[in-house]
Image: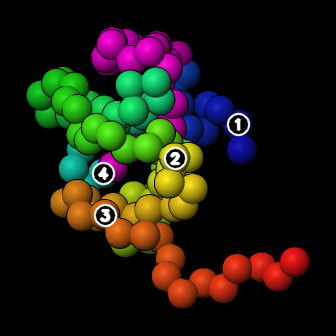
Amino acid sequence: MQLTDLVPDPAALERIATGSTWAEGPCWIPATGTLRWSDIPGDRILQWHEETGETTEYATGVEFTNGRVLDRDGSVVQCSHGRRRGRTGTPSGRRTPARRGVPRAAG
């Protein structure tokens, strides 16, 4: 697969938001038409809304959460460095531990 298979040529970069000290972990969420990412030093998750072009603070005090991806049902799965675990969040915002009852590796 080539980059041009994903991004049409010619493509142009567009700045959609400012104000993050260190932005990472972006994920496009089709169900809400939003792009969500982390501002690690700010300990918050920001969200850009395609329909309005507005950037909002999705959550604060998130224990340095980043590294997100969508699972098959559209829920956001993300890593929390501070909590040392994965979490799942539904498009509506409900958050739960990503897995329960998974045995730890021996040794």
Q: Are marks 4 and 2 in contact (CB under 8 Å)?
A: no
Q: Residue furthest left?
A: 52
Of residue 37 and residue 73, the one placed in the foreground of this image is: 37
Q: Which residue appears at 60% of the width and 39% of the height? A: 5
Q: Position of residue 76 (x, y in %)?
A: 39, 58
Q: Tell whether 10 sits left or right of 88.
A: right
SS label for mark 2: loop
Q: Earlier in the sequence, mark 1 or mark 3?
A: 1
Q: Are marks 3 and 4 in contact (CB under 8 Å)?
A: no
Q: Which residue is mark 1?
A: 2
Q: Which residue appears at 70% of the width and 37% of the height? A: 2
Q: Residue 95 shows which numbered tag?
A: 3
Please state which of the two labelled residues, at mark 3 or mark 4, is closer to the viewer: 3
Q: Which residue is mark 4?
A: 30
SS label for mark 3: strand
Of residue 40 and residue 55, the one placed in the foreground of this image is: 40
Please state which of the two labelled residues, at mark 2 or mark 1, is closer to the viewer: 2
* Residues at marks 3 and 4, CA–CA distance in whole angstroms: 18 Å
Res 88 quadrant in image: bottom left
Q: Earlier in the sequence, mark 3 or mark 2?
A: 2
* Residues at marks 3 and 2, CA–CA distance in whole angstroms: 16 Å
Res 89 quadrant in image: bottom left
Q: Residues within 10 Å of mark 3 (few under 14, many from 20)?
A: some
